Image: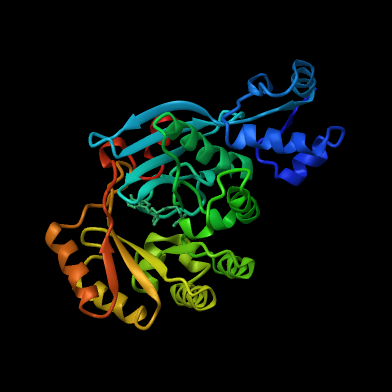
Amino acid sequence: MNKKNLFGLTLTELENELSNLPKFRAKQIAAWIYQRGAKNFEDMTDLSKNLRADLNEKFEIQTPQLVKKLVSKDRLTTKFLLKFNDGAAVETVLMRHDYGNSVCISTQVGCAMGCKFCASTLNGMQRNLTAGEMLGEIIFVNDFLKTENQKVDTLVIMGTGEPLTNFDNLLKMLKLLHENYTLGMSYRKITISTCGIVPAIKNLIAEKIPVTLSISLHAPNNKLRSEIMPINSAFPLNEVLKAGELYAQETGRRVTYEYILIGGVNDTEEHARQLAKILDGQLCNVNLIPINPVDERNFQRPTHNAIQKFFHFLNSHNINATIRKEFGDEINAACGQLRNQNL
Ligand code: SAH
């Protein structure tokens, strides 16, 4: 018989599954699987042996398995390759900032978006991750940090996959993560990065959960954006910008625009001028990201000089820009690189 997986269920769903037991049991079990690191019912030492055996007959607790772990030289970045029950593997990254521990999760196995500079999309998309699998990535890292008396403080949804094309699972995961029987994470500590799925940005606004929205722009005009991001033909630049503006207006939260700097492609002063112009007046930040070159892709890093000039141009034209601190590029932290090596 196929056992029913309990990991990823809400408390109400657990109560329904365990309706023949007193309600407090569901709470107890939720704490075990989401907070106390139980991998099976045998671990749940405050349940009677009989009950543990009964539960084990019908249910299981599916959590991701560690395939590989890489630590950067400065020890600030740890990259995990995690495998799910069907053998699909994704990358999850822990970044130790001075303001706390941040985990970056994947939302899909591979990616369908086809961005020309990105390693995640080289082999297309295999499948969406479930809410339980995404939560599993976070809980895995939280359990890992427990051994150092630490925890996950913030979440960035910026790993492999386009989160807004896996909307329902994403939303279920966010709501679960917010519950006090899991990590009780505040929505304000969560950032979602998207390549600009306009209708889904509007759906996210309607949900009224105050997460930070980060939009991958990467080009200041339609022509160039379409060349490097095929999604731009479905949702063109001006619509993406309008959705970003609406997000800021409706949530009162500053939108981050990510802009990868690619040597000779989008890093000239003219590009900076166009970017400053299209973002003029928006409640936003620009995060400049010198490209992490991907072997299979023919893009070069910008020069140090080009990065500095671009940065100063924006800041002196009323656009608040920062340069992304690079984490662990020597351990293939660019999305999808570790998984591709493993395929
Ligand atoms: N699909 C979502 C989230 C995943 S990508 C999105 O597009 O935002 C997360 C970020 O990494 C995006 O800004 C993406 O453009 C960027 N990225 C992809 N490949 C990169 C590379 N080679 N170097 C630097 N950043 C990259």
Pick the quarter of the image with the N terminus.
top right
Residue 191 seen in the current view: no
Q: On the rendered structure, is 62 left or right of 275? A: right
Pick the quarter of the image with the C terminus.
top left
Coloring applied to the structure: rainbow
Which of the two residues, 307 or 61, is positioned nearer the viewer here?
61
At x 63% / y 48%, what residue is drawn?
176
Q: Where is residue 319 in the image (x, y as percent from the top left)?
A: 29, 76
Q: Position of residue 308 (x, y in %)?
A: 16, 64
Q: Position of residue 199 (x, y in %)?
A: 59, 68
Which of the two residues, 163 or 93, is positioned nearer the viewer here?
93
39 lies above or below 237? above
Quadrant position of residue 26 = top right
15 lies above or below 65? below
176 lies above or below 39? below
Q: On the rendered structure, is 179 left or right of 151? A: right
Q: On the rendered structure, is 27 left or right of 299? A: right
Q: On the rendered structure, is 4 left or right of 158? A: right
At x 43% / y 63%, what residue is drawn?
214
Q: Position of residue 310 (x, y in %)?
A: 20, 68
